């Protein structure tokens, strides 16, 4: 997780083990305080859960994040890896 803050957005570069992807989260001036606090807990080199939409622009994948939070439980990482393997097998081999 690499973080780059700007006045209207925050850019992150995430690596989920399959590659790197750029994530942008737009800053809402009326954002709830707890959301700002959660985002402040994200650290370079840490793990984050991202909720957003995937888009492709000029053959480059990027995510527009609606919510991000620090991963607190290491089991979330294991679950994500298992979920990724399951989705891959489902999409390539069928269910």
Image: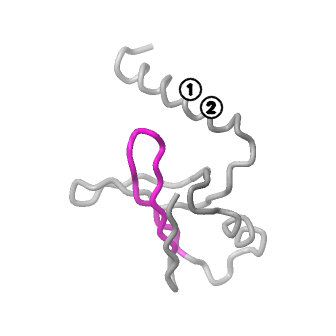
What's the CA distance linking mark 1 and mark 2?
A: 6 Å
- Residue 13 part of the magenta segment: yes
| Mark 1 nearby-residue class (10 Å; few <14, some 14–19, many ≥20) | few
Q: Is residue 28 above or below residue 48?
A: below
Query: Image point 78% across, 69% down: which residue?
Result: 34
How many labels were placed on the picture?
Answer: 2
Query: Which quadrant of the rendered structure holds the C terminus?
Result: top left
Left or right: where does residue 16 sit relative to residue 37? left
Q: Quadrant of residue 35?
A: bottom right
Query: Image point 68% across, 55% down: which residue?
Result: 70
Residue 1: percent from the left, percent from the top? 52, 57
> Residue pushed farthest front?
45
Residue 6: percent from the left, percent from the top? 49, 82
- Find disc 1 in the rendering and name its residue: 82
Residue 13: percent from the left, percent from the top? 45, 60
Left or right: where does residue 19 sit relative to residue 29? left
> Residue pushed farthest right?
34
Please report contact status of discs 1 and 2: CB closer than 8 Å, yes or no.
yes
Q: Is residue 25 above or below residue 54?
A: below
What colour scheme was applied to this rendering of the protein? one colour
Q: Main secondary structure of the magenta part?
A: strand
Numbered label attached to residue 78:
2
Q: Which residues are magenta?
A: 10-26
- Residue 61 part of the magenta segment: no
Q: Quadrant of residue 22?
A: bottom left
Query: Image point 27% across, 55% down: which residue?
Result: 60
Numbered label attached to residue 29:
none
Secondary structure type for disc 2: helix
Q: Quadrant of residue 82?
A: top right
Query: Image point 63% across, 84% down: which residue?
Result: 29
Secondary structure type for disc 1: helix
Residue 64: percent from the left, percent from the top? 46, 61
């Amino acid at each position: 997780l690499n973080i780059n803050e700007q006045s209207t957005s925050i850019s992150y570069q995430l690596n989920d083990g399959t590659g790197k992807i750029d994530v942008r989260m737009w800053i809402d001036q009326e954002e709830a305080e707890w959301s700002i606090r959660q985002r402040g807990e994200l650290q370079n080199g840490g793990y984050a859960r991202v909720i957003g939409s995937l888009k492709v622009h000029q053959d480059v994948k990027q995510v527009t994040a609606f919510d991000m939070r620090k991963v607190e439980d290491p089991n979330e990482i294991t679950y994500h890896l298992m979920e990724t393997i399951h989705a891959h097998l489902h999409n390539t081999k069928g269910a």
